[in-house]
């Protein structure tokens, strides 16, 4: 008998990754979409279009699991509020089930990601784990006492909105100095842009003059190539991440912090400074490992598929 297959969709702040995933977590088909600036109707259309493309490659799929960057009421299947997508107060599960004609399961995108990492990835074998997904913003997920923790209303795990600096820059959530605005993939680009303005003859400065912007991925590539300004920009973002990790360690005492999302491409250039701050400022002896996601940027997709596999069992 062939393995059961489902569709997993990870809907991030600027892009969507989806795939056909079987019960052994093998991915058979992938789709990618981008949607920066799309309104609600267009965002939902892009989601449906992506699922239909995947479904054409897997008509035997038993259902669809979604991870979305939103506060999610998992009982009602509703997207309550989202900083990065126009999905406030959307009955997402029922709406998708109606449009797709398939059973649908829904959770926050990093809840889905930490589910995959805890069961099969970098947090496997632990009872207490946290996950940070560093991308356009910072999403978070919590596993406490071996179970996914959603909190009283489903809003737990918004680790990106840990306040690191009350006088810091404005966050898209409306607050100031959130970890998201200081230590995300977007923040690496901002740090690189600031370095470029201070050193206009540098490689970063030349890129800023030519393109009018410096992206986080370019800063990361330059840092890997040994550029000193880029290295310091990435390290500074890593130190800010470390400050957020200190708070999580002191509050929750997890065994491991899994770092995922696109910004983890910086590797130890980012995580090394974060670990240094954690060791220097965390209470007690070092006890929380800080590791990259085992599944890379596919953690969310695989976790969304696990939601569907669990639901269809």
Image (cartoon, rainbow, N blue to C red):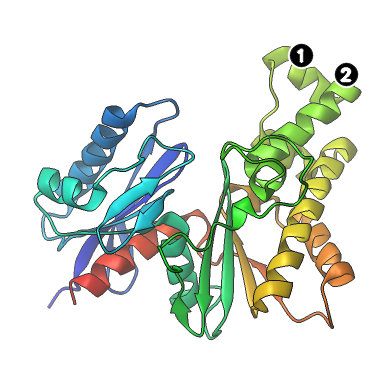
Neighbour tally class for label 1: few under 14, some 14-19, many 20 plus, Cα within 10 Å: some
Q: Quadrant of residue 202?
A: top right
Q: Is residue 140 left or right of residue 182?
A: left
- Mark number displayed over residue 191: none
- Image: 252 above or below 75: below
* Among the two numbered marks 2 and 1 on one chain, the one whose residue lies closer to the N terminus: 2
- Image: 156 above or below 24: above
Q: Tag 1, which secondary structure?
A: helix
Instruction: Say which quadrant the N terminus sits in.
Output: bottom left
Report which residue position mark 1 lands on: 209
Q: Is residue 182 visible?
A: yes
Report which residue position mark 2 lands on: 200
Q: Quadrant of residue 274?
A: bottom right
Marks 2/1: CA–CA distance: 8 Å
Neighbour tally class for label 2: few under 14, some 14-19, many 20 plus, Cα within 10 Å: some
- Image: 254 above or below 156: below
Identify which residue is drawn at 49% across, 70% down.
117
Q: Is residue 58 left or right of residue 114?
A: left
Could you say where residue 271 lies in the image, as x and y percent from the top left? 75, 59
In this view, the residue in front, 72 or 117, is 72
Q: Is residue 157 left or right of residue 218?
A: left
Identify which residue is drawn at 18% across, 43% down.
52
């Amino acid at each position: 008998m062939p393995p059961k297959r489902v569709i997993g969709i990870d809907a991030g702040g600027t892009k969507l990754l989806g795939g056909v995933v079987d019960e052994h977590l093998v991915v058979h088909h992938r789709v990618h979409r981008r949607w920066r600036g799309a309104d609600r109707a267009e965002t939902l259309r892009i989601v449906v279009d992506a699922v239909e493309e995947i479904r054409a490659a897997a008509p035997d799929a038993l259902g669809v699991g979604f991870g979305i960057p939103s506060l999610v009421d998992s009982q009602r299947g509703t997207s309550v509020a989202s900083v990065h997508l126009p999905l406030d107060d959307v009955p997402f599960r029922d709406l998708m089930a109606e449009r797709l004609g398939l059973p649908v399961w829904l959770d926050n995108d990093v809840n889905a990601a930490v589910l995959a990492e805890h069961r099969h990835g970098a947090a496997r074998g632990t009872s207490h784990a946290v996950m940070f997904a560093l991308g356009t913003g910072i999403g978070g997920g919590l596993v406490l006492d071996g179970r996914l923790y959603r909190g009283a209303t489903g809003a737990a795990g918004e680790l990106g909105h840990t306040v690191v600096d009350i006088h810091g820059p404005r966050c898209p959530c409306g607050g100031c100095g959130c970890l998201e605005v200081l230590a995300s993939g977007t923040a690496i680009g901002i740090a690189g842009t600031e370095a470029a303005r201070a050193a206009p003859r540098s490689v970063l400065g030349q890129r800023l003059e030519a393109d009018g912007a410096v992206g986080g991925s370019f800063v990361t590539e330059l840092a890997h190539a040994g550029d000193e300004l880029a290295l310091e920009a990435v390290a500074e973002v890593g130190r800010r991440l470390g400050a957020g990790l200190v708070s999580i360690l002191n509050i929750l005492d997890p065994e491991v912090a899994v770092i995922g999302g696109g910004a983890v491409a910086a590797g130890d250039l980012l995580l090394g400074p974060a670990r240094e701050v954690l060791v220097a400022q965390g209470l007690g002896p070092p006890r929380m490992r800080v590791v990259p996601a085992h599944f890379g940027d596919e953690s969310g997709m695989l976790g969304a598929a696990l939601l569907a596999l669990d639901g269809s069992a």
